[in-house]
Amino acid sequence: MADMVKEFHVFVLPEYEQEEEFLREKSRQGYHLVQVRMPGIYYFKKGEPKDTVYRLDFNPQTDSEKDSYIQMYKDYGWEYIQDLNEYSYFRKDAGTAAEEELEIFNDNGSRLEMVERIFRKKMLPMTLIFLFCSVIFLNYLLSVGTGIHPFMMVISVLDCILILLYVYVLVRCLAGFSRIRKKYGDQN
């Protein structure tokens, strides 16, 4: 389809505000979100430029709760787009709403609660998996000593690259969580 555009962007767990601003800017340019797929593939439909506010909420729902959850947002004028990785995507036309109606959280405590949910549900398991895999990899390297087969050397280099990438993402997430806690904790 000529009016569809696909873009790739990566936002880590605590960068939901940056993702919201990215989506708003795309809408101002006339590209309106249709769908997001892992790993960071955004599908936009070309249309008239419009100031649309996007909000992400991390509040995993059971199937029985989902309809009332979406209806609550709809009652406040938000259009539900989709769920991805337990984030719910909503949007609202900024031109027809008052500034206070463009937020899904009514106070900083609610924002911090969401950040804590993300941290507990996503970040802690990710960290534990990383630590477990690192210990296994380190144990393997120590057990084989200097007699490493060339094929295993390539695998070891790839493992090291993956560990470094994982450390980068982990540090980026932890820094983002810290920034958000400071930002909203200081405003209470």
Image (spheres, rainbow, N blue to C red):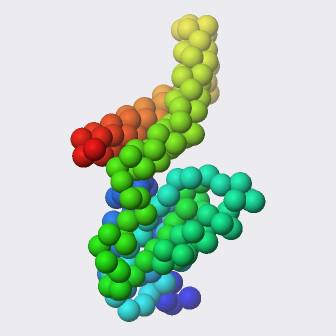
Q: Is residue 58 left or right of residue 67?
A: left
For residue 19, which quarter of the picture? bottom left
Q: Is residue 180 visible?
A: yes
Number of callouts: 0
Of residues 18 and 104, the one nearer the viewer is 104
Q: Position of residue 119 (x, y in %)?
A: 49, 38
Q: Is residue 97 left or right of residue 162?
A: left
Looking at this view, name the residue that lies furthest to the right.
64
On screen, residue 40 above or below 12: below
Of residues 38 and 70, the one nearer the viewer is 70
Looking at this view, name the residue that lies furthest to the left.
186
Of residues 74 and 92, the one nearer the viewer is 74
Taking the spot 61% from the left edge, 68% from the top edge, the residue there is 70
Q: Position of residue 140 (x, y in %)?
A: 61, 14
In which quadrant of the rendered image does the N terminus lie?
A: bottom right
Taking the spot 61% from the left edge, 64% from the top edge, the residue there is 69
On screen, residue 73 above or below 109: below
For residue 94, which quarter of the picture? bottom left
Taking the spot 50% from the left edge, 58% from the top edge, the residue there is 57
Of residues 13 and 140, the one nearer the viewer is 13
Taking the spot 37% from the left edge, 40% from the top edge, the residue there is 177
Q: Is residue 175 visible?
A: no
In which quadrant of the rendered image does the C terminus lie?
A: top left
On screen, residue 103 above or below 98: above
Q: Position of residue 138 (x, y in %)?
A: 54, 15
On screen, residue 48 above or below 140: below
Q: Position of residue 152 (x, y in %)?
A: 61, 24
